[in-house]
Image: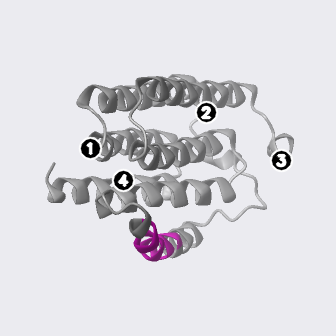
Amino acid sequence: MSEFLLWFSAILLIVAALGLVLSRDWRWSLAYLGLQYVGMYFLVEAQWPVVMAATRTVTGVMATAVLGFTLVGKRDDLPAMEASNLPGGRLFRLFASLLVLLSISQASLLVQSWFIEVSPPVIYGALSLLGMGLLHLGITANPFRMTLGLLTTLAGFEIIFSTLENSIVVTALLSVVTMALAMVGAYLINQDVEPEVLL
């Protein structure tokens, strides 16, 4: 696969992860999540066979659909359910995201020395998802937003893990974990769990 396509996919992942952190509308958030799994396909496909990479992408899109079907009947003011004592301003989230991306640009050089045979855009894209997913988890207590953060973090882990292992069983297990996270998130969204219960 060409280096240009790998870098394009890594940038696509960064844009999608940044959009997830900054978006306040659940429809846009799900669109960014789906875009994230499309970008993830190309980075995983650089390490895995096409069928296995496509399986991960389809599972991610299915997880996005599960969350989407859950939210169709909910109120449009879902972001207003964020806990009021947590930082929620877009400027704060943008600044925190830029700090995470700056840190990742330095950390990717160290990780590249551990995985010499892996392309730099694969490592940068994976670390970007890991960092942005953890940031998302750190600034929200909303079940929907937490699910997005967990799925983003897991996607980053899967990209890193694809450089080490290309077993069909592992692919199936990761797919099961992704769907399980989406279903648990859908359950918590339907239950309208208060943030204090999740702490």
For marks 2 and 1, give the CA distance. Answer: 35 Å
Q: Residues within 10 Å of mark 4 (few under 14, many from 20)?
A: many
Can you say whether 146 is above or below 187 in the image? below
Residue nearest the viewer, comparing 32 with 53: 53
- Kind of residue at badge 1: Phe
Q: Circle 4 — which element?
A: helix
Where residue 93 sits: x, y (%)?
56, 67
Mark 3 touching mark 4, by CB under 8 A? no
- Report if residue 43 lies within the magenta region: no
Mark nearest the camera among 4 and 1 is: 1
The residue carrying mark 1 is: 42
Q: Which mark is residue 13?
A: 4
Can you say whether 140 is above or below 99 in the image? above
The residue carrying mark 3 is: 199
Give whichever of discs 3 and 1 has the lower sequence position.
1
Where residue 56 sits: x, y (%)?
39, 31
Q: Circle 3 — which element?
A: loop
Give whichever of discs 3 and 2 has the lower sequence position.
2
Give whichever of discs 2 and 1 has the lower sequence position.
1
Q: Which mark is residue 75?
A: 2
Mark 2 touching mark 4, by CB under 8 A? no
Give whichever of discs 3 and 4 has the lower sequence position.
4
